[in-house]
């Protein structure tokens, strides 16, 4: 008997994973200016992170994470590194 191929799971749709969005260069520039920070000051996300892979993120990209709280959601930004 031949085993069925493993089914791939879309982790971006999992209930416990907050919404992630890769920002365009212009959006990233606006965010860095808005908060008066450099990309190096943002928390890092490895390029090998499953979400980074799912978003096809490259080193240097900025990722917006939309964290949902009990009353509102708040954005959180990370940079992709090696």
Image (cartoon, grey):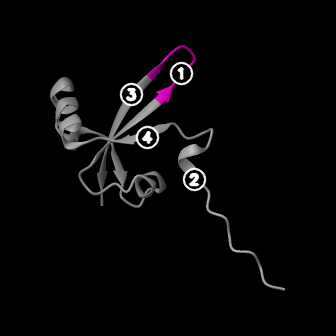
Q: Residue at x 36, y 58 (%)?
A: 47
First in residue order: circle 3 vs circle 1: 1
Residue identifier under label 1: 69
Q: Quadrant of residue 77?
A: top left
Report how far apart the C-alphas of labels 2 and 3 lie in the structure. 22 Å
Bounds of the magenta segment: 67-73
* Of callouts 4 and 3, the N-terminal one: 4
**Vertical relation: 35 (above or below) 3:** above
Pick the residue in front: 18 or 42: 18
The answer to whether residue 37 is left or right of residue 76 is left
Compared across the picture, whether 16 is left or right of 45 comes to right
Residue marked by disc 4: 20
Q: Secondary structure at mark 3?
A: strand
The alpha-carbon separation of the residues under discs 2 and 4 comes to 13 Å
Q: Residue at x 57, y 17 (%)?
A: 70
Quickly name the residue at label 3.
75
Residue 13, percent from left and from top: 58, 44
Asked if disc 3 and disc 1 are in contact, CB closer than 8 Å, the reply is no
Q: Could you tell which of marks 2 and 1 lies nearer the N-terminus?
A: 2
Helix or strand or loop: what does disc 1 sit on? Answer: loop
Between circles 2 and 1, the one closer to the viewer is: 2
Task: Tell me the distance, in whole angstroms, between the alpha carbons under discs 2 and 1.
Answer: 23 Å
Nearer mark to the viewer, of 1 and 4: 4
Categorize mark 4 by other alpha carbons within 10 Å: few (<14), some (14-19), many (20+).
Answer: many
Instruction: Determine which of the numbered discs, if any, sits on residue 36 in the image.
Output: none
The image position of residue 54, as x and y in percent, is: 45, 55
Q: Point out the tag, 1 or 4, that comes first from the N-terminus.
A: 4
Q: Secondary structure at mark 2?
A: loop
Residue at the image point whose x is 29% and y is 57% from the top: 58
């Amino acid at each position: 008997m031949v085993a069925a191929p493993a089914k791939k799971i879309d982790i971006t749709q999992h209930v416990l994973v907050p919404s992630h969005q890769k920002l365009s260069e212009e959006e990233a520039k606006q965010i860095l200016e808005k908060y008066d920070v450099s990309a190096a000051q943002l928390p890092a996300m490895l390029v090998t992170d499953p979400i980074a892979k799912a978003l096809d993120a490259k080193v240097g990209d900025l990722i917006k994470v939309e964290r949902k709280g009990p009353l509102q959601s708040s954005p959180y930004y990370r940079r992709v590194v090696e």
